[in-house]
Image: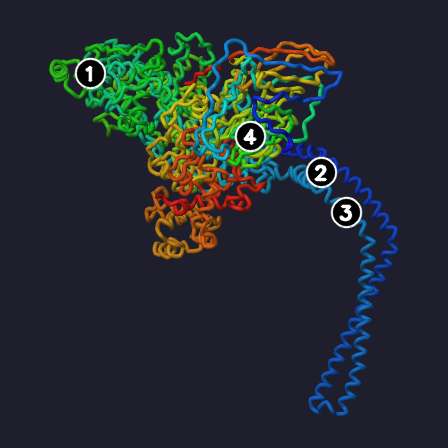
Amino acid sequence: MKILILLTAALATGVSGEATKDDTTGSIEGRIMWEGEKPKPKPDIVITEDKQAVGCHDHGDMRLTDNTMLIGPKGGVANVVLTIEIKDVEVKVPDDPIQIDQKGCRFEPHIQVLPVGATISFMNSDTATHNCHTFPKKNTPKNKNVAGGGNFQQVLDKAETILVKCDIHPWMKSYVVVTKATHYAVSDASGAFSVDGLPPGDYELSWWHEELGKGKTEKVTVAAGATSELTHKVGAAKKKKKRRRR
Amino acid sequence: MADRGDTHYHVPHLNLWFTVSSIVLLITAFWMVIDDWSRPWKRYQAEFRRIEVRRAKEVLEEEPSQAALAEEVQLSKTLVQAQERLKAHTGTIDAAKSEQLELKAVQFKATEAEKKAKQNYNWERFLVDEFRAHHGDDDEGYGKKLEALKSFEDEMARLGNRKKEADAAVVAQEEKVKGLGVEVSSIEKSMKKATKEIDKVREKLAVIAPEDRPTQIANIIRDFPGLDFIGPSLKVNKVLPPNLTFELNFTQKPRIDMCQSCHLAADRVGYGNEEQPFTSHPDLDLYLLAKSPHPLSEFGCTICHRGAGEALDFQRADHRASSEEQAHEWGEKYHWHKQHYWDYPMLPSNYIEASCVQCHKDTLDLIEPAAPKVVDGFRLFERYGCYACHKVEWFPTKRRPGPTLAAIRQKTNKEFINSWIADPKAFRPTTWMPQIFHLENYGPDVTVVHSKYGTERAMMGPEWSDSAVASVASFIWSRSTTKSLPPMPHEGDVERGRELFLLSGCVACHNTVPFEGQTPKEYADDEEFDGVIEDRTKQARGPNEHGPNLRGIATKVTPDWLFQWIKNPAVYWPETRMPDLRLSDRDAADIVAYVFDDPLFADVPDGWAPEKASYKRDVLEEQARWFFNRILPAELDRRFKGEWSDDRALLEAVGEKWVLNQGCHSCHEISGLEDAQPIGTELTTWASKTIDKLDFGFLPEILAEKHGWDYGEKSEFKEYRENFLEHKLRTPRAFDRRKVKNPTERLRMPLFEFNEDQIESIVCFVDGLVEDEVQLAKMVPTPAELAMDIGLRAIRQKNCAGCHVIEPALVEFVDEDDVTHRVRGSFLPIDEEFDPLPPPAKGDFQQWLSRYEEAWEDEVPEIIVRLEGPEPGLGDVGSTVIIEDTASVRIIEPAWGGELVPVITDYYLWEEEVEDVDGVRRSYTEEAYEKLRWTFAPPVLLNEGAKLQREWFFSFLLDPVQIRKQIRVKMPSFQYGKGEAGAIVDYFANRANLDWPARYAKKFMVTHDQTPASMAEEIKGTGIRLDESELGGIAAGNEIATATGLSKLLQYAEEVGFRMDARTDPAYEVIPQRTRGVLEPILEADPGFFGRVHNLVTGEGGPNCIQCHFLRGTPPTQESTPVAWAPDLDQTRERLRPEWVRQWMIDPGKVYPGTTMPANFSLETLQWQDYIAAPSEEQIEAVLLWLYNLDRAEPRN
């Protein structure tokens, strides 16, 4: 396998669009922290030993952490996508497909960010069949059954956040963030992220989280050859506005 | 001559007078001829000729013509040069030609010589042969003779060669001569080619505008007064449509339409921009052209337009102005006014569609695209129940439009009935029930009742109507059954009922739109109420206006009645359109509990308060005197004191009279009055009535006073039947104004409060109800068309579109490259930041967009459309189209149906928890909109005819079974009229372009257990000529056989009483997968075939179909997750058509864009080889075989 498959989303470290470091650019090392009282962690997803998990899990009940809202012991919030869009900077679209694996009846990683025009490859490392059902609005929706060991690829050329599900294993859920941003990162289990290769200047990072919504961080100044620090606090999302229809 | 003096007259004087009068007579004679000659149509024709010349010259000036002309000039130059060159070589050519002649002479001689030599040889040869026959081969002489023959042979050969040489020389010389002229002829040829188009124009010009003087003069003489009977160039153009007649003084007279004497370009393409009368017909694709469905030669003009077809001037043709301005303009220009002595004036342009009715009455629903207004009128006529009072013989609907009153006591209370009759719109502003009492002809301006008894009393004001209302209410109440309903078996759960109200599909037909200008009661204490909701609910939507608005319903009906009604509406009202939703007792009780809990159902318009009847005894008695005027006054007085002394008895007696008088029984079933005659005028041939039979009353005078009309305008008003209709619909009783009439004989048409558009539509329809002139009917609908029409009407009446999308919207937009696209597709929810409300089903999209943006205080960045038909350059079915320029989006045709889909989907998406069919409450807020839409909302019906097997579809309509077990809204059980269910099925089959006649023929044979041969044998005895090959041809879908034989087959079918909608053998539709020929070889070669497919379908490492699909009743492995459920695979065999299933398995997203069914078989890569080692196409075929033989492959235990 060409790219190391990250074992859990919690371990996902920030990846950056422009990873080269030199003296003309600076970087940001930041942390997304929970503000206020921590919500109760969501209960684990338990899949009892029946047919549903055959091919993902050998024997016994399968217990999976619900990774839609992960807050570390010190308050770091995982799986927050941070993006910076700098005008007139060209984003290099990777030649190789960026992968999301289905392994142990989970999507790995839970959040995958890729630039507009990149190719996503949905793999299946399980022996069970998974179906990859994507729910984009702008890109072409796909819904394919992928046999164990198989994969399918799609070029995503419209920026949007795409929900990916496996209907066969309904708890399987992931997001593909297709972004126009020039620099991006995903926070790890401790809420930490880093963005490199930034030209000196002031930046406000945009953030997005599947449950918390989206927003902007505080302004941070980046100097050439230096690393700036940033801590941004997030709290419980506002409730969805409820609609009435008769 | 001198005057002799012996006569009384003076001869010279006489001569003088004679001369003078002769001259005057001569002048008069000439004047007569000229006056007779001078006709407006001739001036139009002359004018048109000028237009033609102008247009021809314009064509010649256009670029292509100019280019051709330039080329012609260029070519003619080279032609001249070539001709000169040719001339220079005249000597050579002449020499060559004379040489050619000489050579030909030589050739002739050589040919003759050769012929001679051949004859000589043949003679000699004969002699030699004869000699040999007599003397034998060995004779010496024979050898010698052979020798001699040889010399003849040589001679012949020599001459033969010479001839060949001569031939060749001649050919060579011919070529040479031709070559000299070839240049010239090729230039001439290319000139002809280049000027082909303009030559036509020039030829035309030569005819209409000849340039040479003699032809010009000849043309003038041809059209000269007095000479134009010989061969004029200006002619009356007549059309004599065969078999079309009109009634003239009790005789049928053939129609002769001379309209084209002036409307010269009516049937010509490209004259749209010319002024009248020289313009083209606005819709030549549909009318006049020979290839159109209404060719000029067969229909003429007046059968549709009316007016006097034989008239040759503007006034006499009875033209009709479309507006007052036009009338005024015509008056100035042509001294136009109504042609008083013609009964059938032209139809004004807004009512022209009225003419469609006379031929298309059997398929009115089908002609909607071409004639929307008259079809709208037809539907309004049906919806408002006009047909119940006004008989229209052929009208397809016969049921009483209003609900039954036979058990009204169970439904509501007496106060409600009383106030409702007095003013139905006071309770429900959108009701179809008209206002009957308190109308103008019983109002204050018709005050005086000239009583028979010498009293003159002001009794026609409100108290007259109040008493009448009270009497009707009493009567209706008295005729209702007194049997009370069983009480509800359950206490209902309000919360559950609220959910059921939305998820059971009530809102597909009913709305709860708030009353105008009033705060909805349910939001009275709601701080969040910000106007957005009000704005949205105000949107008029189509299908959910099918049933009445339910606002305030809890103040009207009793809970027990409502429970019974939603459980099974037909129990209360057998003819109702409300279907049986097959609700359980618990569900029904919950809905009832909710309805009696939510304040919106208790919300009534301001001012509505059901009151006890108020009446006056003396008014009632007066009314009784009028109604019972055949009873002696003394007897009546006795009754007033006797049996009618009780007010109730008097109310009921008068009430019955009022009911019969005002026609309540025409629309409502009332016990005892089932067979009473409806009260309205029959309208079957209303529009053929002459205008003098319509009683305009004093309305023209009243209007003339009001608008200051002069005498002409006033009398003109009375000349048009449409004026009568318009006023009848607007103010139905206005024709009674100023009349002195008995109270029981006044006009009775109630007030419907139609808006002006509705009035126009209804007038258009009624104006088309003419006596059938088209006796040799032009329009005989094909069986398919008839089925489509009945099907379409049934779909409309059952409101299928309330739940199902039948046709996605047709959207037009301009892309970045300025290319305009028209695509079929559905709008996706705009953005997660916006409320996911799909665009409106009807109305202006841009208006909707700006309202939407205003409400959300944000700009919609783009519109996203999912294609539901392929569009070149944009993508295939299922592709997403992003339209960034939102201003360029237009809805050409709104989506048809599916109102309930967003209601249900939104509910699942936004509600914290929703109860599933297994009774468990689950949360779906995190699911994707699309997934919920395809899982829990009613299915779309795109291409349904191609998807479903006809028999299954038919029996499903009659007796629905649940396909998608997770959906909470059930397909209701409708009551179908005769042939309706079959017609719905056929409607979809025809939409999918399936061959209906072929199916008909096949089914006919299958149900009668016959082959084409045996069938033909049987038909033989009946006198219908239909042979085996024709029958076989129809069944095979052969077009020619169908065209010639279908009507005969239908005739025979009718004779033996065969109907397409009978329930019959489901196997008539042949499924190839189930036939022996296909199945046996496979099973012989591989007995374990089904087992291997079974493993593929059910194995965890395979496509794992049973994860979601039920299999022969066994729940899917994801039994606990209803969002993933899919139909039982066992239903495939009888339900789906194999070709559809094949496409479905290959790529479900192209069949239903957005569906939850994944693409299981990748045509690019090999998959599931452990189960069946074969390419995907073969795997699909294997699964198909298994699916269609599930009963054999997977026997039930």
What amino acid type is highlighted by mark number 3?
Glu
Same subunit, tags 1 and 2:
yes
Q: What is the distance, in whole Å, between disc 1 and disc 2 at their CAs?
A: 91 Å
Q: CA distance from mark 4 to mark 3?
A: 63 Å
Circle 3 chain: B
- Residue that label 1 marks: B651
The amino acid beneath tag 1 is Leu
Q: What's the distance in space between the residues labelled 1 and 3, CA to CA? A: 101 Å
Q: Residue at x 41, y 23 (%)?
A: B922
Foreground label between 4 and 3:
4
Mark 4–mark 2 CB contact (< 8 Å): no
Q: Is residue B10 left or right of residue B908?
A: right
Instruction: Please provide percent x and percent y for residue B704.
Output: 42, 15
Q: Nearer the viewer, mark 2 or mark 3?
A: 3
Dot 3 corresponds to which residue? B188
Viewer-side label of 1, 2: 1
Q: Chain of mark 4?
A: A
Please state which of residues B349 and A70 is positioned toward the viewer in this rendering: A70
Depth check, front residue: B155 or B41: B155
Circle 2 chain: B
